[in-house]
Image: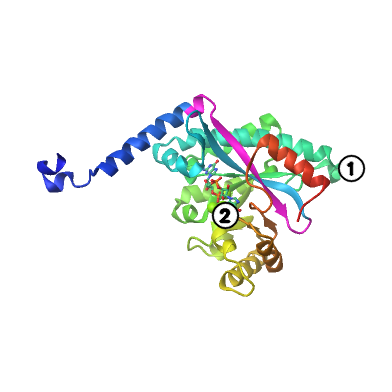
Amino acid sequence: EAKRLGRNRYQFFSPSMQELAAHKLQVSNDLRHALNRHELVMYYQPIVDLATNEIHKAEALVRWQHPTRGLVPPFEFIPVAEETGMINRMGDWVFRQSARDTVTLVQESLASRSAPPEGNVVDATIFQVSINVSPLQFQSSQELQTWQAYLDQIGLPAECLAIEITEGLLLEASDQVKATLTQFRDAGIATSIDDFGTGYSSLAYLKKFHIDFVKIDRSFVQNLGAGNDDMVLCEVIVDMAHRLGMRVIAEGVETEAQLELLKRAGCDFAQGYLFSPALPFDQFMTFVRDWRKAPAH
Ligand code: C2E
Ligand code: MG
Ligand code: MG
Ligand code: MG
């Protein structure tokens, strides 16, 4: 028994911590195989333009189709991937798969139009997919060149992609990571701040990074009520974001009442179970096609 060998020396190795470490090792080994065996899958959640009621945006969300555990949600493996450095390989796969799917979405959107876009310019107004990135992916300045080379290869304009970084992670990020964020933006890839309101950054701070989109965290949307604190917060976030040249996406919209209040607050985009959960690519395509024929809400 560990205890007998000396209190101070072994006090940190409680069984639960051993189990935790073993579990982490297991997940990280599994994850390596997952990449080799192509068990990761990209899902897409539609983002509705509240001004036009159109869908020309989506968020790419990774899933792990595990042979025995079934569909594993990202919170069960992203943290481990970040700790073990696996996030780089995973993030690279996420980017490539999402970019390829975006090509299809852009083509499909173009085909559905009665007239070609003005000047034949393909940009964010045709279709834009946002990809969640871990700041660890930006530790090397090579990342952007890698992305650009791949976008050239598959013929996707950078404007059709956005990256999402959480507010908390932006605050903790190194100067190099912050500089890389600006470089992505300069390259034409839009930038979004995810889970806004959960950290302690101000919109004025975000302005320094020329952020395009602010995503209001689900926790504020959840408790929206006419005139309550969270409603005031949403109104203030939208107003200030607009004045600073950013647009606002509300996440986790589940009810018509929430949608109504968000529209009233002047929110630009909304995503959530009210419209659709994240879907496998084929189902997402069908959802968008059906929405074009007969938009709901
Ligand atoms: P997130 O980027 O804030 O994504 C939103 C999460 O809320 C997603 O969970 C989505 O499925 C869920 N969601 C959407 N609408 C609703 C709703 O109306 N109600 C509720 N209760 N939930 C809703 P998911 O897919 O499990 O992803 C969790 C987090 O994992 C993401 O949070 C993101 O931070 C991270 N993540 C997901 N995919 C990736 C990825 O490819 N790379 C990285 N680095 N992180 C990812
Ligand atoms: Mg996100
Ligand atoms: Mg989010
Ligand atoms: Mg979130």
Q: Residues within 10 Å of mark 1 (few under 14, many from 20)?
A: few
Q: Residues within 10 Å of mark 2 (few under 14, many from 20)?
A: many
Residue toward you, 102 or 261: 261
Q: Is residue 233 above or below residue 20?
A: below
Residue in the picture at 67% in, 54% down: 274
Residue 217 seen: no
Q: Which residue is mark 2?
A: 193
Q: Where residue 28 sits in the image (x, y, percent)? A: 41, 33
Q: Where residue 106 sits in the image (x, y, percent)? A: 75, 39
Magenta segment: 34-52
Residue 36 located within the stretch drawn in magenta: yes
Rendered image quadrant of residue 230: bottom right
Q: Is residue 36 left or right of residue 297?
A: left
Quadrant containing the C terminus is bottom right
Mark 2 secondary-structure assignment: strand
Q: Which residue is mark 1?
A: 114
- Which of the labelled discs sits on residue 187, or is there none? none
Q: Distance from label 2 to label 1 (Cα)?
A: 34 Å
Q: Is residue 4 left or right of residue 172?
A: left
Rendered image quadrant of residue 62: top right
Residue in the picture at 44% in, 38% down: 81
Residue type, label 1:
Ser
Q: Is residue 2 left or right of residue 155?
A: left
Query: Which of the marked residues, 2 or 1, is nearer the chain's N terminus?
Result: 1
Residue in the picture at 54% in, 56% down: 195
Residue type, label 2:
Ile
Residue toward you, 291 or 110: 291
